[in-house]
Amino acid sequence: MRKVIISLAPVEAGKPVDKEALVEDVVKSARAGAAMCHLHCRRPDGSLTPDTTELEDTFERIAQRTDLVIQASTGGVSEMNIEQRCRPLDYWRVESASLNGGTTNLGEAVYINSFEDIRYCARAVYERGIIPEIEVFDIGMIYNIRMTQEQAPYRDPVLYNLVFGHKGGMQPNIECLTTFRAAVPSDAKWGVTHYGRDNWEFLAAAIAMGAAVVRIGFEDSRHLAPGKEASFNYEEVEKLAALIRAMDLEPATPQEARQIMCTLPRKKP
C-alpha cells in the first residue's frame, strides 16, 4: 500500500509563539498521523531570527515525546543572508531542511534566492548529511535546481515541494498542478503545499496524482471546513489522515517517511 508523508508546518508567520501549547499540539498531531515537523527559526514574538536557541529547545521537547522527522526551514522573507538562514542546519537533530529553488514574489514581498544562495544551501545541507526538501514556487525553479546539480552535490532521490497559492506564484488549480507535476524529473519525488488553502480538493488531487508528501498546518492555512477554521493543528492532520485513508492509502509513520526520503542517521556531537 502506498504511504503518504504528512508534513506539519504548525506556526503561522508573524504570530507570537506559545511554546508549551505548540509542543502539545505537535505531539497530538504526531498521534493523528503526522510524520514530519517543519519549523522556522523564530523569536517568541514570531519574528524570524538567526538565533537557533528557541528552535532547538522546541525541537528537543518535540523529540522527547515523538519520533517525528525534524525539518528546519532555511527560508522566509527577512533581512537575513543565506549564511544566517542556514544556521539551523548546525543543530544535530535536523534530518531534513528546506532548500529554496529561486527568487519569487510572495504577496507584496520579494523573496530573494539567488543561484549562489541555492548553491550555498545545497552544499550546507549535504555536508551535514541533511536531506533537502526543495521548495519551488514556479516551474523555472525546477530547472534552476537541475542546473545547479552540476555545481552542487545533490543526492538521489531529489525531493521537490511544489508550493501553490502565494500571490506571485503558481495557483492551486488542476491545470497548474498537472503542468508543474510534468516538469518534475521522473527520478525525483514530489509533494505539495497549498498556501492560503480554503478547500481540500487540491490536496486530494495531488495525492491522487502521486504526491509523496503533503504539507498541512497553520503556516499555510487554518481552513478546516466551509466557514470553519481549526483551533489546533492536529485537527487538520486528523482530516488529512482521514482523506488519505479514504483513498485507500495510508499516512506514513516517521520511520516510513525516513525510508521514503532516504534520510541519514544523525548523531549527537
Image (tube, helix red, strand yellow):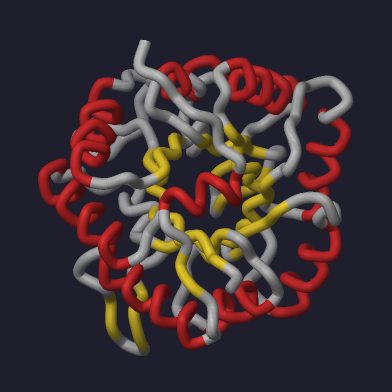
In the rendering, at what x and y percent does residue 39 appear? 37, 41
Up the image or down, 74 lies above or below 31; here it is above
What's the residue at 54%, 84% (across, down)?
Answer: 248
223 shown above or below 49: below
Would residue 203 be found to the left or right of residue 219 on screen? right
Rendered residue at 37%/59% (across/down): 34
- The answer to whether residue 52 of the structure is visible from this angle is yes
Q: Which corner quadrant holds the N terminus?
A: bottom right
Q: Establish if 91 lies above or below 199.
A: above
- Observer-nearest residue: 9 or 37? 37
| Image x and y of residue 220, in percent | 43, 60
Q: Residue at x 39, y 37 (%)?
A: 40
The residue located at (71%, 38%) in the rendering is: 102
In the orientation shown, which residue stands out farthest toward the front? 1
Q: Which residue is at the front of the view, 171 or 131?
A: 131
Q: Residue furthest left?
A: 20
Left/right placement of residue 255 relative to residue 205 reads left
Percent position of residue 221, x then y:
39, 66
